[in-house]
Amino acid sequence: MNVFDIIGPIMIGPSSSHTAGAVRLGTVARKVLNREPVEAYIELSGSFAKTYRGHGTDKALLAGIMGYESSDEEIRYSPEIAEKRGLKYTFVPTDIPGAHPNTARIRLKAEDGSSCEVEGASIGGGNIYVDMVNGMKVGFTGQMNTILVLHYDKPGLIAAVTNYMYEHYSEVNIGNFRLARPKKGGEAVMTIEIDGRPPEGMIESLSKIPDVINVILIKAV
Amino acid sequence: MLEYSSIEELVKAAEDRKLKISEVVLEDEALQMDEPAEAVYKRMADSFKVMREAVVKGTDKDLRSTSGLTGGDAYRMKTYRERTGGGLMGDFMTGAVSRAIAVSEYNAAMGRIVATPTAGSCGIMPGCLVTMYEERGFEERDVVMSMFTAAAFGMVIAQKACIAGAQGGCQAECGSASGMSAAALTELMGGSPRQCGDACAIAIQNQMGLVCDPVAGLVEIPCIKRNASGCMIAFSAADMCLAGMVSEIPPDEVIIAMKNVGDALPQSLRETALGGLAATPTAIKLKEKVFGKEK
């Protein structure tokens, strides 16, 4: 703990779980899509479903989807900004059984038809828990810097990624590693949580490894 | 290095070196964060700037919260102050209270604020310190420095007790903010490190037992008005100590007492919106107005 945990963070009200956490969930979805979204379909479960309007959770999610940060003053105008940008959005209260009370399931579509789906929760203090990405279990909290490697399920790919990290960025220590692969030979995802910050250029270089579709970084709070 | 484990530790560290608590803390934090002191100071100055902006934007006549339940009260207070030359509390105090309300209302309207220590209690410190800066002619440097004393006291409270309403009730949020601000005000006015500790103790004592009972679960009613009173309690606690009064119960014992009271609070009075004001018939109607009827 330091002085800025007490005098800070600088944030958008009214509460970190409804604003900062929701912005971060939107950001994760935007990064997974990796393009400018033109359509957003957002299902809200539990307490989010009942109270999202009064807390501004919808505005915060939308702001994250459009690429705003959790301290940007534009957050409260995000519906108007979305309209200007031509981003169509729908919020649907629903019930995701067994999900954390503050859960959102975000589906995004881009102009070229590509799409993504992210399901996660705002668990307090601006922290998040991301459960699923494109139907694959990822299960990370975002408290550590987290790298998601979306890739095709091919032999040797885990070694290719981790060896590359070891050879070029030996100072990086992996704190947690998880692989999800719903179907043999299909799409798969590595969830890599690392200690400290990722070195400059590492994310870009990893995304150039053959059979890697996309690499994204979810920065710790 | 400091451990921030007790107020006594901070007071002693400052007394031993004949420095202000804020000076000891800035030096220590720069060391612990491995950053130049000036860079750490600059970050705190940025927070003070955000506070000043929030005061201005939160005083807008047409400000409304996202829920529509609150907004415009800081403007009411400000114009009342001007119209009446300071109402009952006087020009200075009505100004401080209107600033505390402004920042707290701005938070409810999805504005940018500094959590001090939380978003729910974000109006108290600006109510105190922006007022000292704008109306008492204190230098920005001195005001920003006093925030390091406030922060150090908050770190002790967070470690010994807690600063979250869900855990310790409103006393843990507004009580802590008020105690931290009282210490900062006392230092700004030239009080000794021990007087800073006593001012913090008195402010917390005067909010001990305060429950967290937000109407409809929103950080609005009664939170915004509790920021106003938390600000006044900070000023009165600082004045009492500067007058030579002391806290008979030492600050570290007061903080532990606050923790014990928080632990004794039922779940219904810890941010769940199930008890206190949140459970009144009017609160339930307001909740239905914002979120619709429970199915």
Image (spheres, coloured by chain):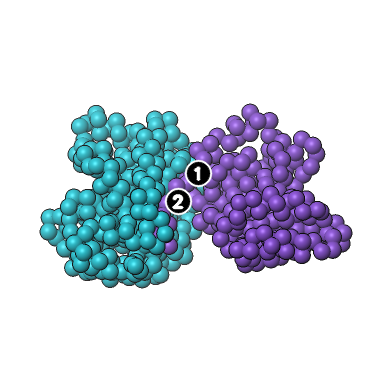
Q: What residue appears at the point 46 percent right and 36 percent down from the top-left corner?
A: B64
Is any part of residue B229 visible from this angle? Answer: no
Amino acid type for the residue under numbered disc 1: Ser
C-alpha distance separating marks 1 and 2? 9 Å
Question: The N terminus of chain A appears in which quarter of the rendering?
Answer: bottom left
Q: What residue appears at the point 37 percent right and 61 percent down from the top-left corner?
A: B31
Is any part of residue B71 visible from this angle? Answer: yes
Q: Is residue B256 left or right of residue B247?
A: right
Q: Is residue B59 left or right of residue A119?
A: left
| Residue B236 horizontal/vertical position (percent) | 21, 52
Are labels 1 and 2 assigned to the same chain? yes
Give the chain letter for purple. A
Q: What residue appears at the point 29 percent right and 30 percent down from the top-left corner?
A: B79
Q: Are the two marked residues, 1 and 2, in contact with CB atoms closer than 8 angstroms?
A: yes
| Residues packed near mark 2 inside 10 Å, few (<14), some (14 to 19) or many (20 plus) | many
In which image quadrant can residue B172 be found? Answer: bottom left
Q: What residue appears at the point 34 percent right and 61 percent down from the top-left corner?
A: B28
| Residue B73 horizontal/vertical position (percent) | 36, 37
In which image quadrant can residue A148 be found? Answer: bottom right
Pick the front one: B268 or B80 = B80
Q: Which residue is mark 1?
A: A71
**In this view, B56 is above or below B163:** above
- Report the chain holding disc 1: A
Quick one: SS at disc 1? loop
Quick one: SS at disc 2? loop
Q: Which residue is mark 2?
A: A9
Give the chain letter for cyan. B
| Residues packed near mark 1 inside 10 Å, few (<14), some (14 to 19) or many (20 plus) | some
Pick the front one: B226 or B15 = B15
| Residue B181 horizontal/vertical position (percent) | 29, 53
